[in-house]
Amino acid sequence: MRLSTLDLPDKSHSQQALAEVYEELPEGVEIEEPCQGLKTWVNPINGFRVLRLHYSCDPKKRSDEWKANEKKKYGESEWNREQELIWEALDGRPVYADYWSAEFHISKISLGWNPKYPVCRGWDFGLNGGCVFAQLFPHSRLFVLREATSQDIGFERFIEEVNRLSLEWFPGARFVEFVDPTGRYRMGADERTYAMMLANPPLRCKTILSGANDMPARIKGVTDFLKENVKGLPTYIVDPSCDMLIKGFNGGYFYPFDNKKRLKDKPEKNEFSHIHDANQYLCSKVRTAKLDYVTQYGKVKEPRYSHQESAPANY
């Protein structure tokens, strides 16, 4: 079983230095860094020494100006593979290649959560289930706070783990569920549906909404967030702990080629597709869902945009 286990969200919003470029490095080996941009280690299987050479090894290529000029020559996915050495997708085209930017959409600090707003959970069902936890803030900014993924375990067991993590990460939160529309149908000979399982203990979900079923509509729901910004800030921002979601955005979630080297119209079903399906169900409907927002004065239909809290007009 593989399931993410993370600490509670860090509620600190202080500014920190920009994170280093995302790197894929082996685990369990000693990694040396003779100079900036050069890392080296010994492959424990064959004893070969491996060198990872990044463009930042050249002092002339460390300026923001050089990077900005060079990026104009590449698409986002090509830049990630050729220059940033991100290798999740070597065959095919990343689904969000034209809209996703790791530098722009990944938070530089751990994202905190706000108890005033409901926590939205996007679900993908099955043995390889996925669940994303997000909050929709004013100006339609979506903060993806955490993820949970599973591999070859029953959905009932996955629900128990999601319930445990929800209580750990978001104590006292109110949840809204966004699910695969097919989750309302019966599971084979079983009389229950996935939606019924969410509504029953331990989760006892009260609001279960169907995400878009059509793949283009689901992908559009995500790209609409990715391509927008609010005063230069991303409308869609991901906590750096969401490893599987980020790797999928970086290229692991992609359109494969067919036998004639033409791109297929549906993304590859792989370890990254499940969490991205969950993300799509949420993104495709969260903006149109009727979410209630809670203040010290009670429930209001829309979030307050003022920096100072004031009672709603009806109070």
Image (cartoon, grey):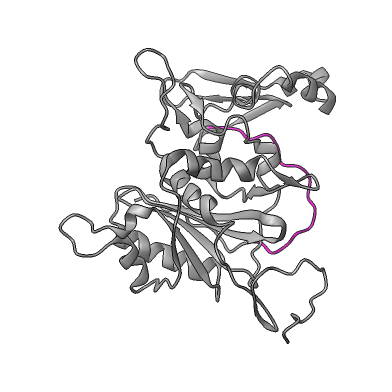
Q: Nearer the viewer, residue 201 or 9?
A: 201
How many labels were placed on the picture? 0
Using residue 48 as the reference point, say whether residue 228 is left or right of it.
right
Seen at 62% across and 49% down, the residue is 238
**81 is higher (above) or lower (below) than 241:** above
151 shown above or below 42: below
In-image side of 279 versus 313 (left or right): left
Across and down, in percent, residue 162 comes to 42, 62
The residue lying at 64 percent from left, 64 percent from top is: 113
**Picture coordinates of residue 93 (x, y %)?**
50, 25
Give the quadrant of residue 123: bottom left
- For the residue pair 130 and 48, the one nearer the viewer reads as 130
Left or right: residue 179 compared with residue 40: left
How far from the left and from the top, in percent, is residue 296? Answer: 70, 82
Residue farthest along the left direction in this orientation: 189
Span shown in magenta: 10-25
Of 2 and 138, which appears nearest the observer?
138
Q: Main secondary structure of the magenta part?
A: loop
Asked if the stretch drawn in magenta spans residue 237, the answer is: no
When the figure is inspected, residue 204 is found, relative to residue 97, above or below; the finding is below
The vertical placement of 244 against 309, above or below, is above
* Quadrant in which the C terminus is drawn: bottom right
Q: At 50% from the left edge and 66% from the top edge, which residue is drawn? A: 176
Across and down, in percent, residue 281 comes to 47, 51
What is the residue that sits farthest to the top in this orientation?
260
| Quadrant housing residue 229 | top right
Horizontal relation, residue 154 to residue 67: left or right: left
